[in-house]
């Protein structure tokens, strides 16, 4: 059984980190953790996650009903989403929901982060699926994540944000960091015009490492299919060489005109 005060302290600490790193704005985001068989701890609604104190953390039962004495605060409006995770995945002991800008951009663009790109991400979060949009605070989000969380500890919520699951509060938070870091790098690689995807052979070696390290949680094997951009690369370089030669032609023409005008 968890020490309640220590768990409250950890939730406050992770709240500070997600706010400091810009993973949430204003009072967004929520964190929860399993206290014991009957009770959970959750962040309060309407409070910045960067300014929480341990007394603000609310104890709720497995139906989401508050059982703690601090009546000044109400449980997170997204508590239904957290309850769904604990119901579907008894191995999960903490959940972090945030709106980190890069990962959320992919969620808004409707692009899952499922390609085999970075070794650590392949091992820790695997392919990150995209859950269909659901109205916050209703059962639409729990319904949209139900199947996906069976095989994944990190999910993008369409037009909304991220959900990460962990064996404890720090584990769920670290998966959020890995997810946002990956989204940031994938975004930048796309801007650079190319994204090399690791081949199947390398992905399988990484998955063997995951088994060897005996990492907790569940991951979906990432997609090792090369990006279409790699096949269009020759077209892009061709296009750019075209524009260079056009520029060259213009330069030569200008030089000729300059020489002629000197006569
Ligand atoms: Zn949210």
Image: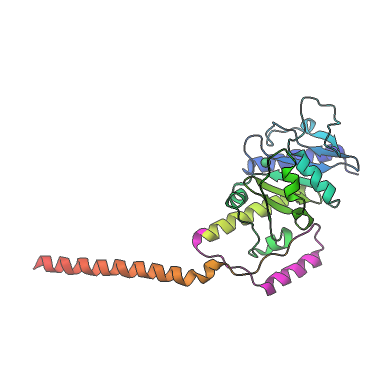
74 and 81: which is toward the camera: 81
From this viewpoint, which residue is outermost toward the bottom?
201
Is residue 245 left or right of 120 when viewed as pictured? left
Q: How is the image coloured?
A: rainbow
In this orientation, does residue 96 appear? no
Residue 105 in percent (x, y) is at 58, 50
Quarter-wise, where is residue 199 in the image?
A: bottom right
Residue in the image at 72% along x and 40% along y: 30
Task: Indicate the quadrant containing the C terminus: top left, top right, bottom left or bottom right.
Answer: bottom left
Residue in the image at 84% along x and 37% along y: 5
Residue 32 among those drawn in magenta: no
Is residue 167 left or right of 262 when viewed as pictured? right
Residue 200 among those drawn in magenta: yes
Residue in the image at 59% along x and 47% along y: 101
Residue 216 in percent (x, y) is at 81, 58
Residue 185 in percent (x, y) is at 58, 57
- Number of callouts: 0
From this viewpoint, which residue is outermost toward the left?
263
Quarter-wise, where is residue 113 in the image?
A: bottom right
From this viewpoint, which residue is outermost toward the top?
72
Quadrant position of ligand 1: top right
Give, as a single range, the part of the protein colored magenta: 191-219
Task: Indicate the quadrant containing the N terminus: top left, top right, bottom left or bottom right.
Answer: top right
In this orientation, does residue 140 appear? yes
Q: Is residue 121 above or below residue 26?
A: below
Residue 183 in percent (x, y) is at 61, 55
Q: Is residue 110 above or below residue 136?
A: below
């Amino acid at each position: 059984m968890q020490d309640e005060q220590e768990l409250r302290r950890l939730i406050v600490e992770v709240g500070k980190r997600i706010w400091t790193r810009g993973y949430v704005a204003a009072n967004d985001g929520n964190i929860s953790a399993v206290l014991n068989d009957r009770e959970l701890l959750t962040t309060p609604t309407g409070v910045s996650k960067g300014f929480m104190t341990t007394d603000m953390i609310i104890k709720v039962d497995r139906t989401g009903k508050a059982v703690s004495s601090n009546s000044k605060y109400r449980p997170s409006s997204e508590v239904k989403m957290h309850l769904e995770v604990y119901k579907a995945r008894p191995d999960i002991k903490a959940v972090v929901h945030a709106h980190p800008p890069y990962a959320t951009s992919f969620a808004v663009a409707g692009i899952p982060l499922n390609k085999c790109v970075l070794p650590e991400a392949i091992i820790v979060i695997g392919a990150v699926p995209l859950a269909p949009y659901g109205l916050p605070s209703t059962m639409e989000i729990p319904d949209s994540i139900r199947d996906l969380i069976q095989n994944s500890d990190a999910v993008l919520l369409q037009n909304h944000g991220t959900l990460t699951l962990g064996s404890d509060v720090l584990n769920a938070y670290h998966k959020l960091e890995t997810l946002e870091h990956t989204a940031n790098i994938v975004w930048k690689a796309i801007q650079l015009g190319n994204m090399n995807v690791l081949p199947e052979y390398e992905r399988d070696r990484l998955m063997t490492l995951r088994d060897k390290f005996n990492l907790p949680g569940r991951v979906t094997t990432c997609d090792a299919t090369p990006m279409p951009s790699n096949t269009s690369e020759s077209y892009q370089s061709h296009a750019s060489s075209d524009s260079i030669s056009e520029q060259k032609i213009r330069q030569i023409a200008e030089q000729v005109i300059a020489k002629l005008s000197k006569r």
